[in-house]
Amino acid sequence: MSTHHISYADLSGIENKFSRLREDVREVAADVNHIGREQSQMKSQLEQLIDDFAEFVDADRKQKALQLAETRVGVLSQQLQTEYGYYAEIRRLAVGMLQGVDVGVLSDDTLRASTEEVMMKAPGYWLAPVLVALAAWIRQDQTTMQRALAEALRRDDYKTTLFLVLVMRRLGRREASLQWLQRYFRHQDPRHLDREFVTLLEGIATGLFPPAARQLMQDHLRQWLNQLTEGGGFVEKQRRKWDEFMEATAGMVGPAATTYPQLSEHATNWAELNLGYNRAHVHELMRQHFDNITSGAHDFSTSLKTQLDETLSRLVSNFDDEELPLRHEVHLNQLIVRNEGDKAAAQAQLAAQDGLFDQQVDLLQLLTNALFDSELAGTTRVTQALALSVSQSWILEAHGTFTARARQQVPAQAQLALDGWQGQSADGQNETALLDSQSSHYAAIMQTELAKVAAPVGRFVGAGVLAAFGIWAASNGGGLALLGAVCIILAGVLGYTGWTAFTKTKQQVRDAVNERHRRAHEVLRGCLAELVDFRRDYNRRDVQAADLQQLLANITPESFSSKTYETSRALA
């Protein structure tokens, strides 16, 4: 009996050690699985944190740039008012003086007092002595007129001459107008035209001058265009300008991520897709821009006298050269505000508009400026129409280059990445193949994750040993029979609980992977549906390139009003 008791004690110790070993192995396996899941989760969270931080930094940078730009717009505008505010008063006085002379309500004393005062307050501004000369001419004071005119020509021969060209024409002094016009053209270099030249172009293009003036201008313009297009890279420069303008216009369209949220999140080449999408939208924007010019170019219902008033008003209202650097800074900061703090986009737009603030430009650049932004260039649709008829060929070439590059660079495939799976689709039509590929991906994940679930081998071995001992003890009968029965029962419980825990863990893994699989399928279907809409919208936008090409190709001088026909034909 004592021998049996000793054997029983020894087996109990072995069983306890087996139990502890099994528990330790199970805990280690569980810890390993837990650590693996936490590591994967931590990696995803870290990547998301990096993306969120980058977005935060970018948003913060834009917000600070926006606030600074808003502040600088106010400060610079105030500086303009402080330094050049009186120039604006003189410009208003000039407009009022011309209108007052028309209706004859200004006395000689009023004219004299007003004009002499501006001479003292604006010692370097060309318009001040011009007004003195004009007032002296009206009251027939030849001596004062000659002295004031000489001073005006000394300060700015170019602008003074242009002003008098328009005033003489307004007052019906045709011979004097032509003489000043001839003087004006003698000073011109087609490679270095002052901004005010566009004012004269406006006047002649709208028929405000007699035929002799138009012929004089046509002769000079024809000669200048021949000079510029024969060499020097002037035409190529304008092609590049138009190409840059179209690229900058694409940058103004804005991101399409809000329209395609899932595609933008899971397409690794979304930046390229979005750029192609925005470039395709440029065709419609450019067509609207040129439609606005061509449809309005013939609509001149105002009288010639009113048009002359507008032309003279633009001449005396345009910013002086001294103001341009500050105006340039104000415009840059206004673009930053308009782009919600995106300095890169603002600078790209400003670069595309480069030349609008130049004090001197060549004739081709002047025409390009008129088409880029008529308000900043100081032109109306009349000059825009003229510029379009002249610039048509290089706009067509630039648009063709832009379109070819845009189509070449837009990705043919959307590269998708979801939960470790990668695939690609051109237009969403290969949904079945991608879903099958994704299913294979998750089948592999399932196999890998299930392989990580360790079977309770120690428990099964312990249960087997315990069951074998129980069978041996029960077969010997006597007092060992009861012990054997207990061991067999314990072995069954041990094996059953081990197997149950094992199968439960595997089922949990299956459920988790299947849920990931299900969600990934939903996201993939959403991405492909958005890709279908994206391609449809892209194609709808891209096909308008042909419409724009046709619009430009059909532009002829005859497209515009009879008032601009002869000048347009000469330019073309």
Image: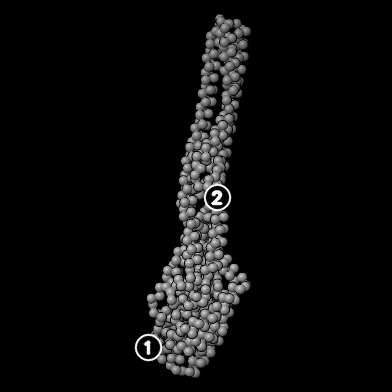
Give 483 or 440, whichever is nearer the viewer: 440
Q: Secondary structure at mark 2?
A: loop
Q: Residue at x 54, y 55 (%)?
A: 407
Q: Is residue 119 visible?
A: no
Relative depth, front residue between 194 and 300: 300
- Asked whether the beta carbons under mark 2 and mark 1 sit within 8 Å of each other, the answer is no
Residue nearer the viewer, 461 or 369: 369
* C-alpha gap between disc 2 and disc 1: 71 Å
* Whole-percent x, y for residue 392 in the image: 52, 68
Q: Inspect the image, locate mark 2, and give the three-letter code of the amino acid beneath it.
A: Ala
Q: Is 429 above or below relative to 363? A: above
- Relative to 191, say whether 404 is above or below: above
Q: Considering depth in this image, is 40 or 563 the residue closer to the camera? A: 563
Quick one: SS at disc 1?
loop
Q: Where does residue 184 sit, x and y in percent of width and height?
A: 53, 84
| Left-right relation of 316 to 465 | left
Residue annotated with mark 1: 104
- Of badges 2 and 1, nearer the viewer stands 2
Q: Is residue 522 above or below residue 317?
A: above
Q: Residues within 10 Å of mark 2 (few under 14, many from 20)?
A: few
Outermost residue toward the top? 478
How is this picture coloured? one colour
Q: Residue 319: x and y, percent? A: 50, 76
Q: Which residue is mark 2?
A: 412
